[in-house]
Every structure is written in C-alpha cells, then in structure tokens.
Image: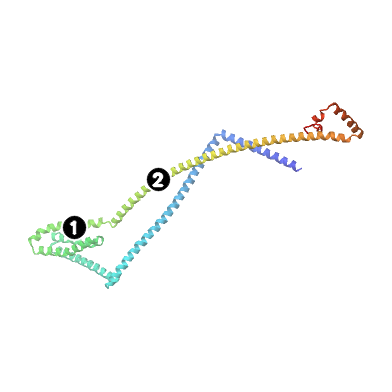
Amino acid sequence: MYSIYDGKRKVDNTMSDQIEREQQIEEESLTKNSLQIQKAAWIREELEKRRAQEDQLLQQILREQQMLQELDEDMDQNMAHAKEGRRYREDMKARVDDRVYEMHDLSADKREGMREYGYAYRRGYALAMVFFSLALCVFAGYLHGIASQTCLVLMFFTGVQAAILVHKKQCPKFWQFVCDVFSALIFPGMLILFIGCELHYSYYERALPYCLAVGLFLLALTTASYFLYDPYRSARRRVGDAKSMIRSIERSAKKQVKKNQKQQIKEELRQDRLQKKESEKLLKIQQKQEVRLEKQGKRLQKWETWKQQFLERFQKREDIVDEEVSDETLPDTAAGDETLPEEAVVDEALPKETAGNETLPIESGEEDPDDPHI
C-alpha cells in the first residue's frame, strides 16, 4: 500500500513539474514575441542599473563623508594642540615678563595703570587742543568773518586735528607717534599764524594762501582716510594667502587623485595578470593531474586485466587438476567395488601380458633386477 501511494505521489510531482515547464515556456514565448513586454523589461533593467549606480554612488559619498569627518577631527585636534601650544608660549612669556617686572617692583596693576595714564594724558591733551582750536576759529570768525582766509585756514587745520584724534587708534605705532606730534604742533602753529595776521606782518599775509591750500589738502586726506580705512586689510591679506593655499591644496589633491587612480588601474592590471597566471597554473596543474589520473587509471586497468587473466589461468589450472584427480579417483572406486574372483582373474592375466612383452617393466617404470646399471 505504501509503495502504491509513493508511486502516485511521484506521478503527481512529475505532472506538476511538466505543467510548470509548459507555463514557463509559454511565458518565455510571450516575452519574446510581445513588444510591450520587451519595452517593460528593458525599462526595468535600466532602472535596476541606475539604482545600482545610485547605490554605488551613495556608498562612495558615505565613505567620503566618513573619511572627511575623520580628517576634520584630526585637523581639529591638531589646531587645538597648536592653539594650546601658542597660548602656553604666550603665557610663559607673560609670566617671565611679570617676574622680571616684579623684580624691579613693577606689578601688573601698576604697569596697567601707567599705560592707562599715558593713554589718557595723550587723549586729553589732543582733545584740549581741538577745543582750543575751535575756540580760536570762533574768535577769528567773530573778528574777520567766517569767509575770511584766516578763519578758513583755522577751520581746516581744526578739522585735520579732529580727524587725527579720531584716526589715531587705527594707525600703527609709528603713525600714532607722528599723529601725536602733529596734533601737538597744530594749535601752536595756528595761534602763531593768527597773531601774525592780527599784527599785520607781511610775510604771514603772504603765507596765508599757502597755509590755506595745505590745510585743505590735509583735511581732504584725513577725510578720505576715514572713509578708505579698512580694518580688515591684514585679514584680507591672510584671506588671499588662505585662498592660494586652498588652490594649491586642490591642485595637489587632484594630482594625488590622478596618481591614485593610475596606481589603482596598475594594481587592477597586476591583479588581473596574477589571476590569469594563477588560473593558467591551476589549469596546468589540473591537466597534469588529469594526465596522471589517466595514467594511473590505465595502470590500474592493466593490472586488473592482468590480475583477471592470471586468476582465470589459475582457475583453469585448478579445474584441470580437479578433473585429473576426479578421473583418477573414479577407477579406484570402481575397482574397490568389484569382487575377489575378478581380482584373481586379473592377477592370472598379468603374467601372460608380461611374458608377451618383456620391455613392459622398463616402459612402465618398474626396476629390472638383472640390470647391471642398478
């Protein structure tokens, strides 16, 4: 019963397999003969290729982002170490300077006070000179009018002095010293010029137009410097240096990328060559093994054939020996079964035969007692 059920199940399986094969053949024929299905299959293949390319690009972008993040972290660590080193050097220098000043009884607070006092003194002096110049301009305008040359010269130089007062903090130290000296000398010069003009000295009156031109030029220069001053000039220079460094880094990176691509191509070619060599070696080894196996098979086949032939010969010999032994045993058994009178008859017949044939004992292998060679 179990065998019948197994047979039915095998038949059902074969039938279902045949039906599936027929359905597959029909689907393949439809896909080959239908234009719409071919188009849809082509579009699906293209979409799969594009999706694979996008996945590969995404994986590359993720790897690049990971590498960039690692490089960014390394750069942050290096910058932090550099900042710490710079700050440590500055702190050490300030500490050594503080120790030296403390040896001369000059504490940090005292030195800070001295700096603030000097700055306040210069600032107050310049501001006082500006106010005095304004007062002198008002007085000259009251005496000669605002449109007079004397009042205009005083107003121009007062404007120059105010511009210097505003711009002095934005200049380097050398120009700050020049501005301090110039602002300190402007008001005395204005006062001397005003007094000389009031006393009607001829050379002051002749120098007045030249002073007016110089004052106008200085006022225009200081005004233009106020608007043309760029506090980020040094930073812009550093920006230019940074941009040039970025360009050099990009060039070096492009060169390195090209070099890496060439090395990768060379490495791929080398790997392909090695794979080809290894495949050729494997093929040669397989061929040698096949040849060796064929030779071994032939040897084994020869050995088996020789062994079989030998066994057949040996079996034949054994069969022959068995037949001979059986042939010899059959007369003995027959003679044992006969009666005694028959044996007597045979014994009586033997002397007659020997008498009729004298050479029988020699041929039969019996010994002759009269033979002299015995």
Going from the N terminus, do you reach mark 1 or mark 2 first?
1
* Residue 218 against residue 319 in the figure, above or below: below
* Residue at 36% across, 59% down: 82
* Residue 237 against residue 261 in the figure, above or below: below
Q: Amino acid at mark 2?
A: Lys
Q: Residue 212 placed where, x, y %?
A: 14, 58
Residue 197 or residue 311, whichever sits in front: 311
- Give the Cα distance between marks 1 and 2: 60 Å
The residue beneath circle 2 is 259
Mark 2, secondary structure of its residue: helix
Residue that lies at the very extreme toward the front in this rendered image: 372
Q: Residue 218 bears which disc, if any?
A: 1
Please state, as top left, top right, bottom left or bottom right, where the C terminus lies in the image: top right
Mark 1, secondary structure of its residue: helix
Which dot, 1 or 2, sits closer to the camera? 2
* Residue at 91% across, 35% down: 340
